[in-house]
Image (cartoon, rainbow, N blue to C red):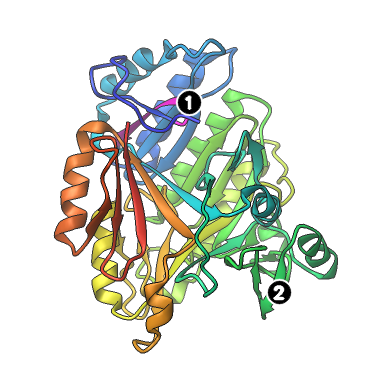
Amino acid sequence: MAEIGADLGAGGAGEWALVDGAAECWFEAPSHAAGAELIIDVARLAAPGPLPEFGLRRTGVSVRVPYDAKGQPPALTGAISDLARRAGLRPDPTAAQRIGITIESPHPAAVRGYWRLVCDYRSVGDELVDPLHRDPVLRFAVTDEVRPLRNRIHLDVDAGTAFGPDRLAELERVGGHVVRGAISADPDGNEVCIPSRPPSRLDDTDELADWRQLMGAMVRYPTAGPAQAAELAAAVAAVADDAGRPLIIDLRPGTVIIDSGKDQQEDERFDLDAGFREVARAVQAAARDLGLVAGSDTGLRHLQAAIDAADIPAVQRFWLAALGYRPDPRSFLTDIVDPRRRGPVMWFQQLEEEDEARRAQRNRLRLRLAVPPAQAPGRLAAALGAGGMIIDDTAAPTRWLVADPEGNELELVAG
């Protein structure tokens, strides 16, 4: 599967990048509503064909247009850029990036089935892919190294499905096992935190019946076509802007997902203008007014990565610089987040300094960051300036393997 390549030269040189077989661009916008206007315009332009994939945020909107069956760049990109310019939305070529996860194993096929089940992903060749293109691609690589100790990196995955006795039995059939509590591990010992209970409702009122709580609050509405999806996006954008509440609004073929973001439904922790439940009620009412019915929990997912670190601030600085992330504003958390709210959350937990053996062992899991070629040198310099070190640059200038101050690895890919 292709990652991020050179700009496409469509819709203005350097605006669009090739990302996993699609042309992608981020347009900065002053509000949800401004981004929603672009979505409405594109829906009219694309009709009767399918709507491109959109990620609507308070600060902008990402647009993803798949290549055609012959692998040709989509002609729609130029027209979308023209519409964005007329609306006063500015493209940001530096914003294109894609975070993935690579798992090394002596027997990749043996662990792939486990992770497909845990993440509720789809197999695409040798990779596992979120069907809705919201969460990181999982790749698998062969290694002969024996790494018997626990990784310092693990994943937290809530894919909207409870892992009760029946689901745990399914994991056992693909080589998984329960480590402790909600922690499960694949056949190689790579760990993941999975839910033991199904997603709960925000509360028991009918006005919030559509919403589910994973690590944030989410709802998914199947839509009849591009016009209806765009209309829902505009309605939700108006609610979010009126309340001063940032929302994650993702439009995919036949469905719209609305997401509070991790913990953002917890009003007491944030200095926001309106309570989340008030916003959620208004979103549900707007969807119902359009005749929409909430879909099943399928497609709802929160995936995040966690790193055990002896010196959390030092390790955190590296990942902030390498990924272009920012710290979560809550002082009691170690989370770092994508400022555009597209990539997975990362968080850090304390590793005992005397745990030298585990610190010395290479992880079986690493993150993979793909950026446009023009952005790679700057991102590499930022990572090295924040305490990183190059451990493999034999494929430079298209690929570098970089480690943080405690040896956790990031694969930086350029084009």
Residue type beneath disc 1: Gly
Q: Nearer the viewer, residue 275 or 98?
A: 98
Q: Quadrant of residue 26?
A: top left
Image: magenta residue range: 20-28
Q: Nearer the viewer, residue 204 or 16?
A: 16
Q: Quadrant of residue 254?
A: top right
Task: Considering the whole magenta stretch, tell me its main secondary structure.
Answer: strand
> Can you say whether 362 is above or below 298 in the image?
below
Neighbor class of circle 2 (other Cα within 10 Å; few <14, some 14-19, many 20+) is some
- Residue 216: give x, y in percent of width and height: 54, 62
Residue 92, can we see it? no
Separation of marks 2 and 1 at Cα, in angstroms: 36 Å
Element under label 2?
Answer: strand
- Residue 347: give x, y in percent of width and height: 41, 69
> Can you say whether 45 is above or below 184 in the image?
above
Q: Nearer the viewer, residue 22 or 252?
A: 22
- Tell me, yes or no, whether the two marked residues, 2 and 1, touch with CB atoms within 8 Å: no
Q: Which residue is mark 1?
A: 21
- Residue 238: give x, y in percent of width and height: 44, 43
Q: Residue at x 68, y 27 (%)?
A: 224
Residue 178's tag is 2
Q: Is residue 386 magenta?
A: no
